Structure formats: structure tokens, C-alpha cells
Image (cartoon, helix red, strand yellow):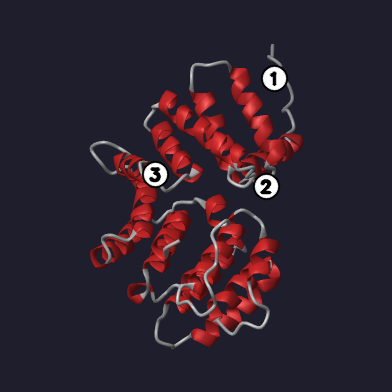
Amino acid sequence: MDLYYIEQQFVLGAYPALTQVSVPDASSQDYIPTLVYKARAFLALNDPDSALALIPEDTDNVALRAVSAFANGEEGLEALRDLCVEVEGEESTWEIEMVQVLAAIAFMRAGEVEEAVETLSGAERAGAETRAILSQIYMSLSRPSVAQKILTSALKASPDSLVLQQAEAVLSLVTAAQSEPYSPAISFYTEQLANPSVSSAALLVGRGVARIMRGELSAARSDLEEAESILTRAQSRPGMGEVLAAMTVAAGLGSGKRGEADELWSRLCSEHPSHPMVVDLFAKAELFDSCAAKFQLPPRAVASA
């Protein structure tokens, strides 16, 4: 498969298909990028062992070493820091960008937000994925204006970049600053879903979420049910959490039976207990119970004669 289509599959979230891609001969110029994207697809599917199995143990390539460190979770953070120091000051290459991108994502997952931003601090001169990731970090920090500034500058330099277009679509879900709210996101997802070479549940979930936010609940549920079907056929558990979370919201907002939303929520809690929505709600419930336990009823007022 051509490297352009491999990158496209990765950006659009077609991870199960990407794990089946054949890796070219080690002498090919596409060998390293294909290996990296295939390994990252396994990582996205929460299968670090398969990702590690792809990486040659004696490799000197910094991108492959970064993938290996990332696959080791928190134990690999120090190795990623060392790699960032190793490539610091060198002329930017695709491999160096992969080191910085993977390190920043790992730092964000570990809660080291400032370190993630510092890792990508040269984004003005960096590649498209670096700037897309940096914009998403600022979105997570509730700074959409900074994210927009980064993307506007990046898209001027690379208007056809798919990863930047995707980041812009996600940003439109945050800002909704259009005469037709969320239309950039829906347009992007609809255009990509029309591509016959890509089968991605992530695109359907993205469009489903945009439709929920526009109140188009029936169309949203249709997208989400199709996404669930794709993941079920692929026997892919990762990604199902996002589907169930969005389906729970759509069912809760709709005019259907309340029991359906409760059933979906129960599935999300039992099958994906670490999903951010589940973790956040249970943390709030625990805080409420703690506060309620400390609350003392004041003495009953007695009217005086």
C-alpha cells in the first residue's frame, strides 16, 4: 500500500485495517514510516505487545525507539525524555517529528501538560502532525483561540494536510463559531466517509457527536449504530467506549425510553470503566457522597410564643 494511503488510514482512525498492512522490505524508503504507522495503529487499539513485536530490538532509528518507549507506558517516559534531548537542535526530519509527537502524547497521558507543550514548542517550524497535536492540547486547556491561531498558520502553509483539516474539524466542535454551528466538522466527516478506501468508526463517531450537538439525534444515532457495527465486525474493543458514551448521550436527550439510556450507561461503566466520562461522573458522585456525609441538619426551628 502506498505510504500516502497508510498515513490517511491512520489519521482517519482506520486502525484495524492498518494493522493488516504488509511492511515493505527494510531497504525500502517506506519501511520506517510504514512500521511506525502500523505500530501506532496497534497502540491506538490498546495492543502495545503487538506494537513492540514489530520493532527490531537493535534499531538505531529514533522514531522506532520512540514507538518502543511509548509502548512501555509510564516506564517509557524517561526514555522518551532522553530521545527528545538526543534530537534537540538537529535539523527537523519526519523521524524527529515522530519522537516529539509521541513524547508529547505520552506526557499528556501522564498529566505532564507543561512538558508536552514544551516538547512541541517549536511548532511554528514543525510538521503538520506536531501542530495538530499542539492545537488539541490547547483545546484541552480551554484555549481555543490559541489552537485556532496555530491551525490557521499551519493551514496557510499546508492547506491540503488531512491531519490539520481533522484538527480544524474538531476545533469547530469546541467553538461552533459559524452561522451553521458545527457544519465544518460535519462537512469534513461526511467528505471522508465518502472515501470508499476508508472504513472508520472514528469518522462516524465524530459526525455523530456533531449531529448530537446540533440536535439531529436520529441521524446521530444512525451514525453511532453503524460505528458500533463496524467495531463489532472487526472485533475491536478499543473505540467502543466512545461509541457507547455518545450513544448514551443521544439516548438521554431523545424522546425514547429512559431505560435505554440507563442500559447504555451500564454497558459503558462495566465494559469501559476507565473511560473519561465514567471516571469523571464517579468522581463527582464520590465527592457528593462525601459532602453529604459531613452535612448536618440544623435544629428544627420552633416558633416562640
- Mark 1 or mark 3, which is nearer to you? 3
Examine the rendered structure and indicate whether residue 8 appears above or below residue 118: above
What residue did someone put label 3 on?
196
Q: Which residue is drawn at 59% across and 61% down?
A: 109
Please state which amino acid type lies under the numbered disc 2: Ser
Disc 1 versus disc 2: distance between alpha carbons? 46 Å
Q: Position of residue 292 (x, y in %)?
A: 72, 34
Whether residue 112 is visible here, answered yes or no, is no
- Coordinates of residue 58 in the picture (x, y in percent): 66, 83
- Which corner quadrant holds the N terminus? bottom left
| Marker disc for residue 122 | none
For label 3, the SS is: loop
Q: Is residue 238 left or right of residue 249?
A: right
Question: What's the residue type where badge 1 is placed?
Answer: Ala
Residue marked by disc 1:
301
For residue 51, which quarter of the picture?
Answer: bottom right
- Which of the 4 quarters of the picture holds residue 65? bottom right
Q: Is tag 1's residue or tag 2's residue first in the polypeptide sequence?
A: 2
Q: Residues within 10 Å of mark 2 (few under 14, many from 20)?
A: few
Nearer the camera: disc 1 or disc 2: 2
Q: How far apart are marks 3 and 2 (CA)?
A: 33 Å
Residue at 57% in and 15% down? 257
- Residue type (three-letter) at the residue carrying disc 3: Pro
Q: Where does the C terminus fall, quadrant-wise?
A: top right
Q: Which residue is labeled 2 in the image?
A: 274
